Amino acid sequence: MAGPSWNYVLKFIITGDAGVGKSSLLVRLTDQRFLANPDPTLGVEFGSKLITIPEEDKVVKLQCWDTAGTESFRSITRSYYRGAAGCLLVYDVTSRRSFEHARTWLADVRAHADPHLTCILVGNKSDLASERRQVPAEEGEQWAQNEGLLFVEASAKNGANVDAAFETAARDILAKIRRGVFDDDRVSPGVKSSSPAGAIVLDQSKASQSCCAS
Amino acid sequence: MEFFQQTYTALRGPTGVQQTPADTITRLSDRLSPSTLLADRRAAVLSLKGLARVHKQLVGTHALQGLLGIIQNDADTVTTLCDTFDGSYAQRDLGLDHTDRVLEDEKTAHKLFALLGDQDPSLRYSACILLIGILQNRPLKVQAYFLKAPVGPATVIALLDGEKEIVGHAIAMLAALIRQSVEIQKILAFDGIFEKLLSVVTREGGLEGQSVVTDALKCVDTLLRFNTSNQSYFRETNLPSLLCSLLFFNPNVQPDQAVPQDFALQFWTEDKIANVGLILESIGLLLGSKGSGLREGYAFTKLLIEMGLASNAPTPLKVKCLRLLPPAAAPLLPDMILTPYMPVPDTNGEEWDRLEAATGIDALLELIMHGEYNGQDSVRRQKESVDLRATAVGVFEHFLRDDLVKEAIVSGMLPSENSGTSAHSPVTPLLFGLIIPPSSPFDRASVSSVQFAAILFAHLLRHAPRCKDLARKIVPPPLTPLSTSTAGGAFFVPADGDPPPPPESTSRDDTEDGPQSLLALITEHLSLAFLQRSRAGLAPREAREADRVICVYLLLLSQWLWEDPRAVREFIEAGGLGVLVEQLNQPSEIDVVVPGLCAFLLGVCYEFNREPGEITRVTMYSILTRLGADVLVGRMNRMREDERIKVVGPDSWVLPCPTPGPQALDPAFTPMYEGEMEIWFDWAFVDFWKANIHTIQRGIVADPDSASSSTAQSGEESILVASLRGIIAKQAAEIEALQIKLKELTTTPLAFAGASTSETSQTTAEIDEERVALKVALEAERTKRAEVEKEQEDLLVLLDELSSKRAKDKQRMEEQGMDVSEDEEGEGEDEDKEEEE
């Protein structure tokens, strides 16, 4: 029971302009509910979820950090980039500004993150697209393609594509692991497999369980 | 200074020019310039290091700038530099001033963070020491620089993998770095600080480890304590189960699984006690914050209960376990089977006896009633052991959240129904504690048991009318003197739950007028305690024991009699009123608590004396007047000033003995043991008393006929109750008025006919009159009509006669040959004519 029921732990960070719905995406992922009026100062900050990737036959634990509280300290968010396996770069489809700022966020990611970090561009608030869209889906997709990012439009409000966004990114990371992008000497800091070399092993039952699981 | 100059002069030789320290330091500072040869520079740094011990200020003023310059460019010298800095922080003001200069810009701090990752261990070490120093002086500034440092948290965390010598300092530096900075705590958690800290713990010998382990666990606690993000992260990991494993507790424990002895019986050292204490705090924190969803929730709860009630853990840790147990865990107690242990006497805690298994709630009650290990040391009343019992009362209070639980417990104290009228209640540990009579001289262990029993029982009864009803039916069995004097002995084992030796002799009450109720017995014991207290030449210690017993009886009675007129009646019939009045007639000169409590209880009796009986409110009113209502009010007020009431808080009612304060009773009193503690009142009572004292003070001056103005609750609730009461009273008055009216209307409806007072009666009378008039008129009409009818009949008869006569005449005329008209007109005319005739 206490042994890991997962094959990998993947650290994700969620980044992007203030107000694009980062916390809402996280809450939608972990709690399946929508934060109508999230407090901008008190983000949810951390959430986790187990997801299954059937074609890989793997269970993955996503640990997601919301960087909302650190917008004022852009420098410290760099430390998060450095330790993450995946990044959700979020903009708001009803705000062109937030889309334009995504470029600077991406530059930050590129400058500090592990080169193998998987980044997915998420156009949030797709539920409002029919009335107030400022960024066409094609434009987002095109830019993502140019920059080598994954892309999805999602809505934390109605839940559309939220799980898909995380799953797509997780699949990509697993594919990288399978291809051996992360060789044994230099595993990405954001990926932890269930039989890590340096883990703390105290009781025997847990250790044996973790061996079986992997 | 003197010594330094002499040495210097001696070294310099007699011929040299006199040199001041300032000159020397200035000269050395000049050599710090990067243009100087490395060897010279080092020599200068070393000399400055020595000088800094004595001339902190001078070195700071002249050399700091140069030293900071070297830190930037020449990492090799930092080792010696750090010592220089280190020295300058001992003197607070100067140190702060120097720190401010070091932190003028971010360069030095960033350099230091970078040096933490340097290849050279001694450099890492020195940078760490220096950071500790400046973090202590200006934490906020260093923290802000850390958040912007280009190297990030990785170097800091990597230090924990380093050599043993450096790990200790790294942890000390971390402790200063994370203090009150949620952002730093979060980023370190993201980078795996929890895992690293706990691996330090396991590497350094687990919980048996020394100060490094303690410091690491303190950091874990800081990282979790006020950081919900880190708490949710920590819960998601497998670290909570690691915490269990560190304590040798199976994190996957199942409810029916026994806990192995490895956990229950451990060897305890000072270090281990500190470490386990920290782990327990973290466990309590994780359990307390949105406890749901925690995989180890059950294991944690069980761990706390097992360690708190059935282990050989040192008492302060047991206190911690029970204190950290979340309120929601208390209902688990009855279903949990524990095996408590007892130390084998004279083995110095090295051998332990396993007792019979008991449920958690039995073990808890046993602990409260007798103290740890069946009251082995309860006579000494040491802080830990009294604290443990008081904390256990808190757990019991959580257990009583539900009124049904209270009722079930009180019902269990009643005599069985089918054993006749003279049946006694079964002796439970609680009841046993309640009925221990005051002995002379006082038995210290028994006094504590009585105090705790009364406080527990008060928890059961307070604001629970159903329980009060049941409690009046408790008939305690008589106790043999033997069984009472052995409290604290070793044979009343909790686990088997057996009552003490069956009573053989019957007390006098039993033979006289049937079994005595618990309330009557307590009243009697109160009176006995007062009697013993008043004995001449009582030793100060004895007097204090008597006061404790008296206070706790009064505590229980005030809460029991509150809002329970029948209990008041019983108390008065058992002679309680006399006891109180006697005490209030000749109150103690020095003590304010007992007279205050007596006045309060008397007020409660007066307020709730609403059942018919021998002593009515009118009788009591005259007694109150004689004692002086304002005097009584004053006595209650003075009680507030007493420290024993004043310092009691929700979690602090175990007080050092004697409780300090102006009312430190008898100057001759000294506690029997060093570090002895005492209890007087629990928070629940003090809260109750504060909420109700005004009601009683108002009630005491009220007229005997006045309705009860009591309000059981406080604040808003009492206002609500008062307003509802007002509405009810108004409605009752209205209903009464309406009923009276209805009665009048139904019983004397005719009266209204005559008495034309109201409008309706007037109209009825008028209608009646009219009706009568109409009736008369109708009658007249009827008679008239009857007369007319009769006349008409007569006329018809007459007509008939005439027509027959005419027919005869006609016949006769025809017979005589006379002309006779046949037409009816003629006839009619005839008739008419005849009629006219």
Image (spheres, grey):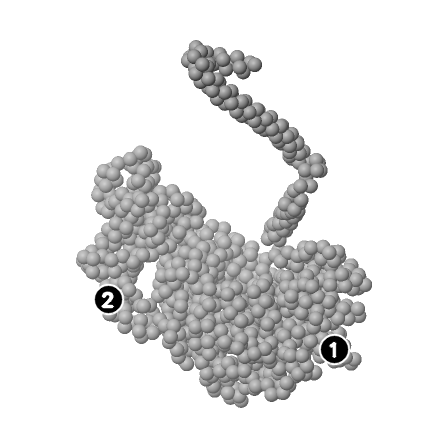
Q: Quadrant of residue B286?
A: bottom left
Q: Position of residue B63 (x, y in %)?
A: 52, 57
Q: Quadrant of residue B17?
A: bottom right
Check the image and report above or below for B35 versus A108: below
Of residues B268 and A73, the one nearer the viewer is B268
Q: Which residue is mark 2?
A: A214
Q: In percent of the image, x 44 and y 18: which residue is there? A: B811
Check the image and report above or below for B66 versus B202: above
Q: Are marks 2 and 1 in contact (CB under 8 Å)?
A: no
Q: Nearer the viewer, mark 2 or mark 1?
A: 1
Q: Position of residue B720 (x, y in %)?
A: 60, 50
Query: Disc 1 sits on a residue from what chain?
Result: B
- Bin the neighbour count of mark 2 within 10 Å (Cα to Cα): few under 14, some 14-19, many 20 and up: some
Q: Position of residue A49 (x, y in %)?
A: 31, 56
Q: Tag on residue B531?
A: 1
Q: Quadrant of the C terminus of chain B?
A: top right
Q: In percent of the image, x 66 and y 72: which residue is there? A: B553
Type of amino acid under label 1: Leu
